[in-house]
Amino acid sequence: MNNEKFKEFDAMDEDELWKKYHKTKNQEIRDYFVIKYSPLVKYVAGKISIALPQSIEFEDLVSYGIFGLLDAINKFDPARGIKFKTYAMTRIRGAIFDELRSIDWIPRSIRQKAKQIEQVIAELENRLGRTVEDDEIAKELGISTEEFQNLLNKLSGTSLLSLNDIWYLGDDSDELSILETLEAPENMKPDILIEKEEIRDYIIEAIKKLPDKEKKVIVLYYYEDLTLKEIGEVLDVTESRVSQLHTKAIMRLRGRLGRIKSNIIG
């Protein structure tokens, strides 16, 4: 960074710099963090844009995400023992999804169809006591397996939005998204409320019970940080098929978690 003040900040221990900003809210320190972590906004926007239609501009996602970065910088508390990058990614992603919801880019019919499939999967698996296959889901929906596959392609964007749903456990600082748990379960500290630990355990257990390929997609996408194209190369399937597997995995997770959510949160 060319600014002489920023060079001074570069030489400082970042933990100490965060502590100083947390106490003083110094604007120069804030600007330093904005510049330093702005590539993170593009990274998050890039991952989200993969599953969105081309009508949603990448630069728009970045502009939405900047608000999340600013929010993260202003609210970050170094005393919590969580890495800023982890905290910021959650806030950046949340800001992008909040804006996407506000412009309501997903047709209501698609939302309703996604909800219907989630319910069908949950009911079938609850009734049969096992993971159900595509042809069984399609039959229950009254469509062909091919039509079901095509429908999954149309629903890919809704799966990302649904993962960002927040489970409120109390006040504004007491919340957890499914996506946050998927991406960074190791960052859930022991001193966080027990409800969060219980939710995390349910989610991790639900992931373990996914069909093998769906589980691999979740692990490779959220834990190993691979793109859909890279996952396709690993699994030797098309990128379109990876998208289908991802969407179906999220619907299974939401269907299963929906049954236990009310028991945890009340």
Image: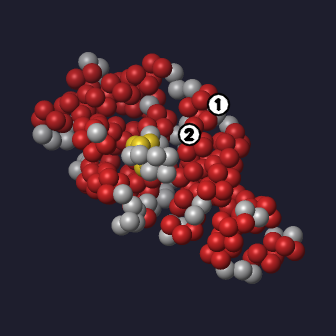
Residue at 22%, 23% in the rendered image: 140
- Where is the N terminus found, in terms of image quarters? bottom right
Q: Residue at x 81, y 71 (%)?
A: 6
Which kind of residue does numbered mark 1 sit on? Answer: Ser
Element under label 2? Answer: helix
Position of residue 23 in the picture relative to residue 181 (left or right): right
Foreground: disc 1 or disc 2: 2
Q: Which residue lies at the image location 56% right of the left edge and 39% below the top edge?
A: 97
* Nearer to us in this view, 59 or 25: 25
Is residue 242 visible to the viewer in this orientation of the structure? no
User: Residue 155: which quarter of the image?
Assistant: top left
Provide residue 8's location: percent of width, then percent of height. 80, 78
Q: Which residue is mark 2?
A: 97
| Residue 249 relative to residue 17: left or right | left
- Residue that numbered label 1 is attached to: 55
For image coordinates 40% across by 54% down, the residue present is 181
Label 1 vs 2, first from the N-terminus? 1
How far apart are labels 1 and 2 at the CA level? 15 Å
Foreground: 24 or 200? 24
- In the image, is residue 83 above or below residue 117? below
Q: Amino acid at mark 2?
A: Phe
Q: Position of residue 223 (x, y in %)?
A: 43, 60
